[in-house]
Image (spheres, helix red, strand yellow):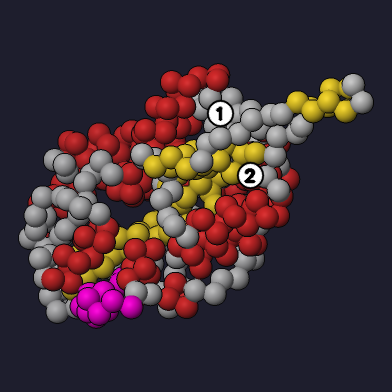
Amino acid sequence: MKTVLLTSFLAALVVAGQPVRAQEAVLNLYSARHYQTDEALYANFTKQTGIKINRIEAKEDELLERIRNEGAASPADIFITVDAARLAKADDLGLFAPVKSTVLEERIPAQLRSADWFAFSKRARVIIHNRDTVDAADVQNYADLAAPKLKGKVCSRSGSHPYNLSLMSALIAHGGEAKAEEWARGVVANFARPPRGGDTDQIKAVAAGECGVAVSNTYYLVRLLRSDKPEDKKVMEKIAIVWPDQKGAGAHINISGGGMLKTAPHKEAAVKFLEYLASDDAQRYFADGNNEWPVVPTVKTHNAALESLGKFKADALPIATLAKNAAAAQKVYDRAGWK
């Protein structure tokens, strides 16, 4: 676990014999986002508000367990993480407090927030294929990944990973569990190897010819597109990107987001921080710094590599629906043998 500066205290000042309490200008943030580019995001908040951010970074399960163990005495004000399934887990534990904010309601589209947590950036889950071994016409939809013609050609990460859980949650929402399980069994039958690694590993495996097709979150692809390393450039030359389901529901969208904790000791600062994450400045940091799309529709970005992916039809399924289906999604993967 990486612990980042968690030292703050209130000083009692006495002026002319009268006690004056100093106002804590501090926010305690528990974050499962591990992107160096977020440093500028947080520094800008402090610059704008004077509120110092004390941050603890760790994996989401570790942070959630820590919050539960700390109970009412927890110093945490905000929990942020990536993926709707992970936010759902925190919500199911009853950790979030409802936030009433006109700013958040006006700037963040309804399908990208719930009463207790908010999305602040978006990423899409796209199909990638080897240009030499798989025809783009054969992988236009997520359903195509289960087609017999792709036997021995599909690479994937674990079925228990939140990225795959959220994709499965969307498939369940659109077609029901039975159809989703049939798809999962078909994909398992097409595996080129047992699931392992992260999205970047799947991309490199497709480029190397270890498999012919995989799925990946877009920001991993844009990271490689922006890389100056010759080996990364060669990887991108070997693969092509397909926006799935463009004649149907659209490409699956997932998010990074967060919410205020019920036991937050600095609730005013917490709401300010959430509203800041929806500001133009912060939204541009998400896009230009970590290759994610803003959730605020009016924000203009300056990430040429991200923009090079082009326009696409996105699945309009409410993110809260993905969260609710996460448990069912895991059961489907388990029954299908997607380890």
Q: Residue at x 57, y 65 (%)?
A: 284
Query: Which residue bears the numbered disc 2?
Result: 52
Pointers 1 and 2 in contact (CB under 8 A)? no
Image quarter in which the N terminus is found:
top left
Label 2 Cα crowd, 10 Å radius (few <14 / some 14-19 / many 20+): some
Q: From the image, which quarter does the C terminus lie in?
A: top left
Above or below for 175 versus 288 = above
Q: Is residue 238 magenta?
A: yes
Residue 173 spot, x, y in % from top left: 38, 44
For the residue marked with disc 1, what is the amino acid?
Pro
Circle 1 is placed at which residue position?
75
**Foreground of the two, 165 or 223:** 223
Nearest to viewer (mark 1 / mark 2): 2
What residue lies at 70% left-to-right and 39% top-to-bottom?
Answer: 25
Question: Eyeballing the image, is 58 above or below 248?
Answer: above
Q: Is residue 128 above or below residue 117?
A: below
> What are the residue bounds of the magenta stretch?
228-244
